Every structure is written in structure tokens, then in C-alpha cells.
Amino acid sequence: MIVAIPDVLPAAHLAEFRRELEAAEWEDGRMTAGAQAAQAKDNIQIPAGHPAARKVGEALLQALTRHALFQAAALPRHILPPMFNRYSGGQQFGTHVDGAIRQVPGTPHRLRADLSATFFFSAPDEYDGGELVVQDTYGSRSVKLPAGHLILYPSTSLHHVTPVTRGSRLCSFFWIQSLVRDDGHRTLLFELDVAIQRLNAAHPKDPTAVAFTGVYHNLLRQWAEV
């Protein structure tokens, strides 16, 4: 399941955070890549412990905690602190799959990467190229979202970032361990949740919504890992 999450951060905060990130120190993005991914990766990143990365990452996670669509789609159990990258001058990231287990920086803790997320700081008209191309069951999907939006997709997916031939593409990226490991199960729960919300909006007192809500929670009870 690939889900676009709109309007994660308001425009005023987005502009402020972007200025802080652009003023930070950057390093070769291959520093955080595995052996195979390093051969395909060509970008720059802000070091994980940088104050700007910590500040903006915490604000982004707080916003996602309040975002109902993200919570419904991801059912997050653990989220790796967001990281930040930039592509320009023809930089790209070749086809790869994200590592299954991610180390939480500065801690002995690890999480399983069920979902990958990319949050866009740059608007689509600021750069050429830079599409995130994700391969799923139905083929390849090319993603280039407005600034302030996020794309959520299974970490099992093969994906790549096309070369940025004009301008600069600034994004955040991170991984999520979901309460529900299986992508098919998460998809069913998400679709059921959305249908229940629509039913409640159209028919607020319809007892059918209560029955469907019970089905949702019983499926979640069966599939969740807590």
C-alpha cells in the first residue's frame, strides 16, 4: 500500500525548518548506507546527531502523531528519528530495497522497517527530476509531492530516486515499525477504517458503524504486535 499524507506541516513552520536545515553541515549520504545501497546512492545528508536534525525531526514526529490519516495508514509502534537528505547536480539513488533492521542512532535499540516514509520540503517546481519511483504489485509509481506532504510505502518495495537535473530536492526520510507487520493486513485495516469514517460522516447514528468498528478492532486485536 502506497499512501500520500497531505499537509503534515503548516507553511510557516515548513519555511522556518527548511532555513535551519539548509544552514546545517552536510556529509556524504553514503555514510549511512549499507554495502549494496552505497554503490547506488549519491546524495548528501545532515548528520543524525545535528541539532537542526533533532529539532526538525522531533517537530515532524509530533505533527504525525496528530495526523489521523498517517496514524490510520501506518499504525506506528516505533518510528526511527527522521533523517534529511538533498539531491542536486545530477545526484540520484539507484534501485534498492531498504534494510530490514534499523539501528536507532545513539542507542542499543533496533526496529524492524515495515514502512518507509519520505517527507518533501522542496516544491515540485523547484527541481527537475528527483521522482521517487516505487515498484509495487501493479507496476511502478512515480512520486513527486508538494512541499509539506509525505509518502508512505512498504519498506519491502524496490525503489529509486531519479537524477535531479535542475535545482535541489530537500527531503526527510525515516522508517516505521508498525503494530501490524503484514502489508496486506495493514491495507485491509486502513480501508476498513476509512470506510467507517465515511459512514459515520454520512450517517452519524447508523448502528452499522458500531458493528464495523467492532470488526476493525477484532482484526487489529488478532494481527497487532504490542
Image: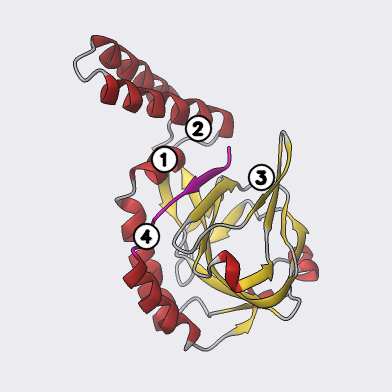
Task: Examine the image and state in which quarter residue 211 appears.
Answer: top left
Distance from disc 4 to disc 2, alpha carbons, whole Å, reads: 20 Å
Does residue 87 appear left or right of residue 107 in this picture? right
Are the two marked residues, 4 and 3, in contact with CB atoms closer than 8 angstroms?
no
Are the two marked residues, 2 and 3, in contact with CB atoms closer than 8 angstroms?
no
- Rendering coords of residue 100 (x, y %): 63, 51
Reply above or below: 35 against 215.
below
Question: How many residues crowd around disc 1 within 10 Å: few (fewer than 14), some, or many (20 or more)?
Answer: many
Residue lying farthest to the left in this orientation = 205
Q: Earlier in the sequence, mark 2 or mark 3?
A: 3
The residue range painted magenta reads: 1-10
Main secondary structure along the magenta-highlighted residues: loop
Circle 2 SS class: helix
Are the two marked residues, 2 and 1, in contact with CB atoms closer than 8 angstroms?
yes
> Which disc, if any, is residue 61?
4
The residue that appears at 32% across and 52% down in the rendered structure is 65
Distance from disc 4 to disc 3, alpha carbons, whole Å, reads: 22 Å
Q: Earlier in the sequence, mark 1 or mark 4?
A: 4
Reply above or below: 111 against 194.
below
Question: How many residues crowd around disc 2 within 10 Å: few (fewer than 14), some, or many (20 or more)?
Answer: many
The residue labelled by disc 2 is: 186
Quarter of the image for the N terminus: give it. top right
Task: Examine the image and state in which quarter residue 56 appears.
Answer: bottom left
The residue labelled by disc 1 is: 75
Q: Earlier in the sequence, mark 2 or mark 1?
A: 1
